[in-house]
Amino acid sequence: MKMKAITTLLISGFVALSGIASANTVTLIFKGITKNTNNYQVSLDGKNYYSNTNTQSGQVTIDNLPLGRHTLKVYKLRYNSTKYNGRTKNTLVYTKVFELRQGYDMSIIVQNNGKVLFSEDQGELSGSGNTSANGMSLSAFNTLVQTVANSRSQSTRANTIQNALANSDNYFTTNQVRQLIVMVTSENSRLALVKLAHNRVTDPASFNTLIDLFKSTAYRNEFNNYMALNGGQTVGSTGQQMSDYQFNSLLQNVRGQWAQSAKAETVHEAFANNNNYFTTAQVRELVTMVTSESDRLSLVKLVYRGVVDKPNFGTLADLFTSTYYRNQFYTYAGITAPPAQTGTNTQLSAYQFNNLIQTVKNQWSQSLKGQTIHDAFANSNNYFTTAQIRQLLELITSEPDRLQLVKLAYKQTTDQANFSSLADMFTSTTYRIEFNDYVYAQGGTNTTNTTVKSPMASADFDMLVLGVRANLLQFLKVSSETNIFNNQSYYFTTAQVRELISLINSESSRLDLAKLAYKTVTDRENYSQLNDLFESQANRDAFTAYVQAYRD
């Protein structure tokens, strides 16, 4: 779902580009950013542009840029007010060097979650129309894309595209055909539209690249059969895997991105490139650098068409510690989930464990140490004693990372009766309580006395809400609610949490607070109902994944 959302955003970005005509013009598009969301500073070759001064039009056109390489940096603003622009140190969330090429228009789309998308299209020739030489004009094509995107049902979208392709006056590039067909989800409808489009394309030599629109082997085979019958070039099942030199360069580029969103976007761009092919081992190495399981699932779905050893693809299931995401992976890959293990689980041998310890110690950064331990715990063939888990966790300094790892390790522990003794790995009361709650939820022993958790009385809660409302500024409201949910004496119903979080405008802050509040809720079986607090599908997915992971 997430990749579909990104594709839709990218298509909507094309719509905004109808005014671009010059090859050395760049359009900067702020997508979905308002005064109540995160705002951003974009630095292009050292010149700054701010989303909070351009949200009315949603875009900035930058003319007369020289062709060649340009440096882009995106910073998250500390304060949304324009009076702070240029006066405070903001947080770098993305950086990239891109190339502006002769004859191409460039758009840079900055989304409200900090992700950055690039799109490049051939500029319109002066006076060009719907000609077989150039495909549909950019302005006419953008109008068509907008019409399709505004259609509420899939059948209406398919009919609109069908009518456009059937019109003898219309011609399209292969790239334009792709942008239209990705808005239709049914592979059966996609195949019918692709067949209809074949005689309307201006670059038939590229038409076979559309095979990656089909995940089903049956539809891919039918696409190839159609191409063969109509004099087109068929596509083999695999390509040439990326060379070691290219892959190591890509790996270094991903590692060089310090923010998770930047790492995920760099991997996404590599996987989305139809000229790139990877072994399953290469895919694993790249995806393990992305911590969000939701993002991992989107990435492995995206790269599937470019995997050269598909029989090994199922081994990537251990990238997902959450049962929810692992099952999603199995469904996508068409793999039957293995039965749960039964019988006695044998801990790692002393030799294997000492090798693992040494491998972790040899990692130069905390993030790499944590990732190495994470991979060991995520491997369903590995089992550990509580003492071994302790030795590994002692190599990690961050308590949030320790908590994530210890949750992951629970199901791989051979002596779960002793697991609660790991509570002393956390000096923070907050993390110790969350550890105890997790162990207790899994049926283990809680190291603290378990008391009945009663939600706050209505009168007291009403006073609490009034206190939050009294804060005029949003960041003060967020700070106030953070303190409330961190108070170990407070417990709430799901309905009370909803009332508090609804006072916050920013979806990212709502998500953080919803995660923080989970440990205070007395009716956790109802907590997933808070999903409707988020309009963004990405935030909905993140919320669902958090609740599911906590339950797992």
Image: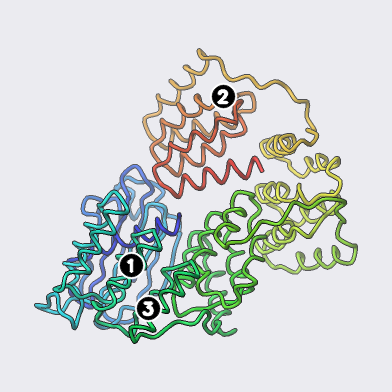
Considering only order in the chain, which callout, 1 or 2, is on the residue closer to the N terminus? Answer: 1
Q: Residue at x 33, y 70 (%)?
A: 178
Up/down of 361 relative to 496, above or below: below
Label located before the other in sequence (2 or 3): 3
Gap between marks 2 and 3 measured at Cα: 60 Å
- Residue drawn at x 58%, y 34% is 518
Check the picture and name the quadrant holding the C terminus: top right
Residue 93, placed above or below residue 414: below
Amino acid type, residue under disc 3 in the picture: Tyr
Q: Secondary structure at mark 1?
A: helix
**Which quadrant of the figure has residue 532?**
top left
Whether residue 490 sits left or right of residue 86 in the image: it is right
Give the amino acid type for the residue marked by disc 2 in the picture. Answer: Phe
Q: Are marks 2 and 3 in contact (CB under 8 Å)?
A: no
Q: Nearer the viewer, mark 2 or mark 3?
A: 3
Percent coordinates x, y for residue 108 in the rendering: 32, 65
| Disc assigned to residue 26 | none
The image quarter containing residue 350 is bottom right
The residue under label 1 is which amino acid type? Ala
In the rendered view, tell whether residue 180 sits above or below residue 328.
Answer: below
Crowding at dot 3, Cα within 10 Å, few <14 / some 14-19 / many 20+, comes out as some
Residue corresponding to mark 1: 192
Instruction: Name the foreground residue: 80 vs 114.
Output: 114
47 in relation to 172, above or below = above
Whether label 1 touches label 3, CB < 8 Å: no
Residue at the extreme left: 127
Q: Position of residue 486 (x, y in %)?
A: 59, 32
Residue that mark 3 sits on: 226
Q: CA distance from mark 1 to mark 3?
A: 11 Å
Residue 171: % across, % down: 20, 75
Instruction: Give the total of numbered labels.
Output: 3
Q: Residue at x 82, y 55 (%)?
A: 383
